[in-house]
Amino acid sequence: MNGIHDMGGMHGFGPVRVEENELLFDAAWEGHVRGMFALILGAGLTNIDAFRHAIERMDPTSYLTVGYYGRWLVALETLLVEAGVLRPGELDDRLRASSAKRGGGSPVVLESVRKPAPDRGPFDVFRPVEARPRFAVGQRVAARNLHPPGHTRLPRYVRGKQGVITRVHPACVFPDTHAHGRGEQPQYVYSVRFVAQDLWGVDGEPAASVNLDLFESYLESA
Amino acid sequence: MPDHDHAHDHDHAVSEGNALRAEALESLLVEKGVVTTAAIDAVIRRYEQDLGPMNGAKVVARAWVDPAYRERLLRDAWSAIAELGLARGGAPLVVVENAPGIQNVVVCTLCSCYPAALLGISPSWYKDPAYRSRVVREPRKVLAEFGLELGEDVEIRVWDSSAELRYMVLPERSPGSEAMTEDELASLVTRDSLIGVARAKAPGSDAPGARRG
């Protein structure tokens, strides 16, 4: 989807601000969100592509204002409701209950929605396929001009642009289907080098390139 | 009130709200048997104790002193990393090598993918819109803002982690470090040099950099 998350090339965000002596987590809750994420992903209650897409589905204003782990928190709630682990509104109910110091609600153990732990790690994405790779190292390709409304890992700034294959990776789980519960549908992934001035025209810097890892169906011969 | 005070107040209020929400979510998930507080604490401890730029620094120092290791690292990063007794990560990792006239730099424009299984938590700036939006469009300018001024004879290769592969930069060995031991060399390798927005430190510069970046 052409969302706020697809930031490559945008203007207006100002200089990069480096925080000196930054803490690992700015506040304790951030570590807890990271921990909950790891456990929920590890338990197979969602997958990394669905998680990224849940962040992308946030309204753009919230995306920019709730902070990095704030986005994770929103995405976790969205996915846990969709997985049936939380009732819609259950988290808000719990918040009201705790602010009024009325104590917790009654435990609801939803064993039925828990999936067995997957036999692979959540980032173990290589899948053997029978097909041969369609493209080879050194080949000139174009990123297709696609604008899917769902999840995709084809950033806007390369669509329609030409580059050269620098490496052929094994076939990987395809995020565009996996995020939407439509299966892994593995495809080869190619490292594609785009010359900066092919991406940004006369505003591109000289002697610079951007390398992206693009799925086979994002590409066509050029 | 100046703008940055407004921004600070806003960030603080947002963080307070998120803290309450995270606590409420955790209490629900514990009750439902989805997570345990001990398991959450274990994840946090892993980031606090086991993962971090010091792991990348160790790998780079070995690659600097052992050309055959360097070859293996560039060919199959996790296998070479595991040789040093470090845990393999889940996401595939590619190490890209700087050379005279070539500077690599890593970003994830679509989210904030980072080789966390080796380097731990990424710095805030890496996750911020400014870095994600700009470094693919004007890398030389962004690197200069980090203090890495590169002449136009240096080619910049930006790696946008758009699939599940993660990237780490193998920086050039610092000039004047010829007599140093592997441990001493590792102390020159900063987090920022592993992302590609800085060079490895020069010998004799102070503060241990691998943890702070």
Image (spheres, helix red, strand yellow):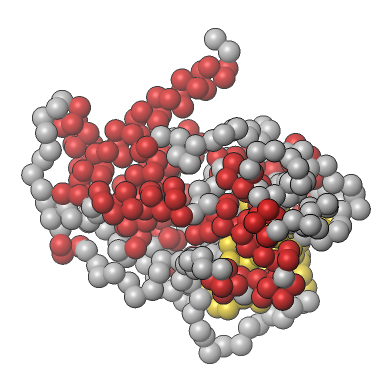
* Front-most of residues B198 and A145: B198
Looking at the image, which residue sits at the far top?
Answer: B1
Q: How many marks?
A: 0
Looking at the image, which residue sits at the far bottom?
Answer: A130
Looking at the image, which residue sits at the far right?
Answer: B153
The quadrant holding residue B178 is bottom right
* Picture coordinates of residue B121, whole percent (x, y): 50, 48
Looking at the rendered image, the quarter that the C terminus of chain A falls into is bottom right
- Residue A37 appears anywhere in the view: no
Looking at the image, which residue sits at the far left?
Answer: A106
Placement of A121 over or under A33, stated as above or below:
below
* Front-most of residues A157 and A164: A164
* Front-most of residues B128 and B52: B52
* Picture coordinates of residue B162, whole percent (x, y): 59, 60
Judge from the rendering whether residue A140 lies leftward or rightward of residue A51; answer left or right: right
* Picture coordinates of residue A131, whole percent (x, y): 57, 88
Residue drawn at x 25%, y 44% is B26
- Residue B44 appears anywhere in the view: yes
Residue drawn at x 34%, y 44% is A32
Placement of A220 over or under B127, stated as above or below:
below
Judge from the rendering whether residue B126 lies leftward or rightward of residue A111; answer left or right: right
* Picture coordinates of residue A149, whole percent (x, y): 50, 56
Placement of A75 over or under A22, stated as above or below:
below
Residue drawn at x 48%, y 72% is A125
